[in-house]
Structure formats: structure tokens, C-alpha cells
Image (cartoon, helix red, strand yellow):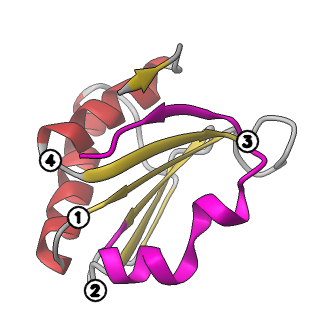
């Protein structure tokens, strides 16, 4: 895993994602490329239930540390869950949905601050 300096709240979210064994974790630095947010955190679960579980864990752990989710989408279905923390947005995917949308390819000019193949 390659890890560069990450903002404080985002590190807590990444820890929660890693605790539940998400796969193919990537952090993209969008500063200067996107006005809506500074970072994308992208990871995959192995099933809809796994994706939902990761999302719920992130929300719970972030809330305990005083970070509130600005917006949540997709948690009921678990195919693509978006957790918006304003400065960073977390995208949690079912593997098939991730392969279809290919966010990393769409943002291929964004530097990767963290990559994990597990």
C-alpha cells in the first residue's frame, strides 16, 4: 500500500473501510480538478451486504469522531453507496458496478494518494 499525507477526517474513514476488508481501495486527489470536493475515496465490497456494512461502519465511526455526513445515496441497494463529507466523497461499490462506471478511468488525471490491491 502506498500512503501519502491524508486529511484527518479522511484517514478515520479509510481506517473504517479497511477494518471491514474492503477491496481495491484508492484515494484520488481532485484538488484543482473538481470544484465540488477535494478527494474521492473509492473501494469495493464483495456483495451488496458487504458494501452496506462498510458504509454503515464508516458513518458510525465518523459520527463518533464528530464528523457528519453531508449527503448519503444508495445505502439501501448497496450497489453504489456515496457518502459525502464535503471535503471528500466516499464511493463504495459492488464489483460489477465499479467495473461499469470506472471512476478511476474518468478521473485518471487525478494523482493517487493511496492504493491498495486487497
Residue 81 - label: none
Query: 75 and 44: which one is in front?
Result: 44
Query: 114 and 41: which one is in front?
Result: 114
- Circles 1 and 4, Cβ within 8 Å, touching? The answer is no
Alpha carbon separation for disc pair 4 and 2: 20 Å
Residue at 87% across, 37% down: 32
Among numbered discs 1 and 2, the one appearing first in the sequence: 1
Above or below, 49 against 91 in this view is: below
Alpha carbon separation for disc pair 2 and 3: 27 Å
Residue at 29% across, 25% down: 65
Tell me if mark 3 has few (under 14), some (14-19) or many (20+) residues whose alpha carbon lies within 10 angstroms of its own: some
Q: Position of residue 82 (x, y in %)?
A: 46, 65
Among numbered discs 2 and 3, the one appearing first in the sequence: 3
Instruction: Judge left or right: residue 90 versus residue 13.
Output: right
Above or below, 103 against 13 in this view is: below
Alpha carbon separation for disc pair 1 and 4: 8 Å
The residue carrying mark 1 is 45
Q: Position of residue 17 (x, y in %)?
A: 25, 44
Among numbered discs 3 and 1, the one appearing first in the sequence: 3
Secondary structure beneath label 4: loop
Among numbered discs 1 and 4, the one appearing first in the sequence: 4
Secondary structure beneath label 1: loop
- Dividing the picture into quadrants, the one containing residue 107 is bottom right
The residue carrying mark 2 is 77
Residue at 76% across, 52% down: 36
The residue carrying mark 4 is 21
Among numbered discs 3 and 4, the one appearing first in the sequence: 4
- Dividing the picture into quadrants, the one containing residue 62 is top left
Secondary structure beneath label 2: loop
The residue carrying mark 3 is 30
Specify the segment rendered in magenta. 93-118
Tell me if mark 2 has few (under 14), some (14-19) or many (20+) residues whose alpha carbon lies within 10 angstroms of its own: few
Amino acid at each position: 500500500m502506498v500512503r501519502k499525507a491524508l486529511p484527518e477526517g479522511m484517514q478515520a474513514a479509510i481506517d473504517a473501510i479497511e477494518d471491514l476488508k474492503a477491496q481495491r481501495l484508492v484515494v484520488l486527489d481532485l484538488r484543482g480538478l473538481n470544484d465540488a470536493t477535494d478527494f474521492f475515496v473509492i473501494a469495493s465490497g464483495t456483495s451488496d451486504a458487504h458494501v452496506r456494512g462498510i458504509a454503515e461502519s464508516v458513518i458510525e465511526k465518523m459520527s463518533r469522531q464528530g464528523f457528519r455526513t453531508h449527503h448519503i445515496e444508495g445505502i439501501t441497494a448497496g450497489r453504489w453507496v456515496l457518502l459525502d463529507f464535503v471535503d471528500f466523497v466516499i464511493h463504495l461499490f459492488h464489483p460489477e458496478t465499479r467495473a461499469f462506471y470506472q471512476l478511476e478511468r474518468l478521473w485518471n488525471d487525478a494523482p493517487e494518494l493511496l492504493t491498495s490491491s486487497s
